[in-house]
Image (cartoon, coloured by chain):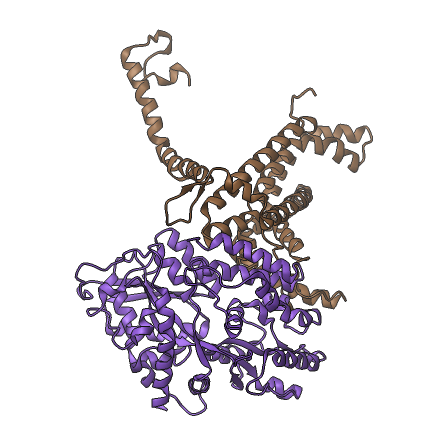
Amino acid sequence: MRIARRTIGGAGAAAVAALTLAACSGGGTTGGGGSEPEPVPTDRDITLTMAWWGNDDRAARYEEAVGLFEEKYPNITVQTKFQAWDDYWTARNTEAAGQSLPDVIQMDLSYLRQYANNGQLLDLSGQEGVNLDVSGLDESLLASGAIEGAQYGVPTSTNTLALFYNGDLLDSLGVEAPAEGYTWDEYDDFIEEVSTAGAGKDPVLYGSGDYTGTFWFFLQNLIQQGKTPFTEDGQLGFTEDDMVAWLERGTDARADKQYFPVEKALQIAPLGGFTVNESASEITWDNFLAGYVADSGTENIEMLPIPAGDDGSKQFWKPSMLLSASASTEEPAAAAALIDFLINEPAVGEIFGTSKGVPATAAQRDAMNVEAGSIDEEVIAYEESVADLVTESAPLPVEGFGAIEAEYKRLAEELAYENVTEAEFAEQWFTFATDNIPQP
Amino acid sequence: MTVTRAVPDGAPPTSFVPTRDVKRYRAGDVRAGYAFVSPWLIGFAALTAFPMLASLYLAFTDYNLFRDPQFVGLENFQRLFEDPRFLQSAQVTAVYVFLGTPVKLAAALGAALLLNLRFRGQGVYRSIFYMPSLIGASVSIAIVWKAMFIDDGIVDQIQQLVGFPAGGWVGNPDMTMPMMILLAVWGFGAPTVIFLAGLKQIPAELYEAAEVDGAGPVRRFWNITMPMLSPVLFFNLLMETIHAFQVFSSAFIISGGSGGPAGSTLFYTLYLYIRGFQDFRMGYASAMAWVLVAVVGIITAVLFRTSRTWVHYTGDER
């Protein structure tokens, strides 16, 4: 198992390498690099603030990890806060505008460039070797958090997409899970079968939510068609027709009410149809398993590779999240020490397991208690099983990705309420995207 | 201010002659006056006047918060009227203002009339009725509201009980506006208190005289209460209209900041916030802010203009 785990990390790192090369463009601003870094002071009390996105399950894990950090550095207190994904970025954007970002923030690839290009993030390379040890990370993976040589984020872990299905629900409905190597059309048939069988139940059960409403899945599907979602000079690599074709995958299912209803989904947010056990399957990132098991209360969640295109599922590894420090932090040394601790400390690897993705450092991968039948084992086994399906590099988000992704999500809601057609969706999205992606 | 007040104690007003001393004393008085209001003046200049001027400038720029603003002339204003979401937000807000405000004022007036009756324990009722407006606009109430109106919330359960199962209002774009208006109406305490004070000012002899002449309760309401109350009604109408244009926090909480479902709670201020703080379009957001100022200004002016025909001030001979 140990060797296999390393293989996974290596594969992830290698995949990220390709992504990195393209990441080295755009106007970076200097952060805290330059002068000789001071070690973390121990003679005075320090308060750090830290923010992440996630659910209660992740909060409990962070509290435990941060508790260990405070034990190691008795003079440092860490104040933590968390929100669900959407609220998280609204709150961070507001703070960024007021130059009051928390000292340490969980960062996503889709926002890294925007924050870094706007001078919000600390160049952590200035702290390397003193307060921050990044030698445990694969070089190419580490580089995914760098822009023009400045280290604005340190990846904590890697992930890839997966199909989750609820074995208990499928058993109760007498529907078979999709077979290995299934296509998008077969997945649509599966959804129809489940929703037909579940229509008479109380509560009504569904095959899936409307998967066409997630931007990343659209991008993954483009990659399966051999297209490049974003060009090297940071522009869109697809057309309105591509988007319409993708959205029309769901037209019949939407008309037949086969998808978990949007009005329900909105009311139970931040939970979803899958985590309240009313939707039998969901495509999502593999590291969500731990959170989903905690939210849904069922252990019987199985994983499959995502539906295949003409040449297989053609998946990619993505740094599931990064840790960044604010450019305005008054305690760069302590902030770097906290990031260092969260990335390297074996005990932290044990606490998080695979809930943030497979850990980026070998020290943390080896420290995980991978028990037979555990969630971590399932995620690791999954990543092993898809390792040869991961043939592509992650698309490199353009600047403004966060905004265009949010707009896609908003329009998906309008589509679900039948306020726009697929063609109007694509037209409005392209208008917005052209306006929000900086032109060269 | 009269001259006598400025004279030092003991100086007889009849023999008062202005001297240099007194002049200096008065100048000092003025300075002291400015000194005492300076906290407000500084606050006004730094926290209101300057930001307003800055946003007026930004309305003509492309500004993403972090990079220097680029002057773009009237582009932001031109784009506003081509933006379907802007038009949607204007429409949502207009419905809320023009439907919600009259309903809220009617509720407030009704409550004030009831609270103006004389019976034991009236003070307790007045306190109870005012209570919602103490917490009406707060975040916590919006959260409670959402919990009441979701699937299987208390409202849904009552609807099922009486045989109108409609599901939660929160996820239904057709029901979110009634829900928002109910939330606004629920905070009717503030205008009620003002109405109540107005009702107390109406001389009892007018009613007595009308009663002697044979006017019934309805006649007395329309011919005495309403005209006598019209200045207060006008004040409340003005305040509540402006207030309604500014609704933000309840919509933000209930829709999770998105203005959903399907844009049905995309209030003007919420869209302004989304453009500014989610899309980083501060110039665009500033332009929206100034359009709102202009619209509220025009509506206020129109209200003032029409008030000449229906508002009666005491001693007014019209």
Seen at 46% across and 55% down, the residue is: A437
Residue B90: % across, % down: 61, 46
Asked whether, in this view, residue A405 is left or right of residue B125, the answer is left
On screen, residue A99 versus residue B107, left or right, reads left
Q: Is residue B261 visible?
A: no
Looking at the image, residue B77 sits to the left or right of residue A376; the answer is: right
Q: Depth check: B233 or A238 in front?
A: A238
Residues B133 and B303: in front is: B303
Question: At which x and y percent is residue A272?
Answer: 56, 72
Q: Nearer the viewer, residue B132 or A60?
A: A60
- Give the answer, above or below, for where B232 lies relative to B97: above
Against A432, is B105 above or below?
Answer: above
Q: Colour of chain B?
A: brown
Q: Residue A79, how many percent across, how many down?
A: 34, 64
Image quarter for residue B152? bottom right
How many marks on residues?
Answer: 0
Residue B232 screen position, x and y as percent: 63, 34
Q: From the viewer's perspective, is A413 left or right of A326?
A: right
Toward the viewer: A89 or B78? B78
Q: Quadrant of the C terminus of chain B?
A: top right
Chain A tint as drawn: purple
Q: Is residue A7 above or below residue A65?
A: below
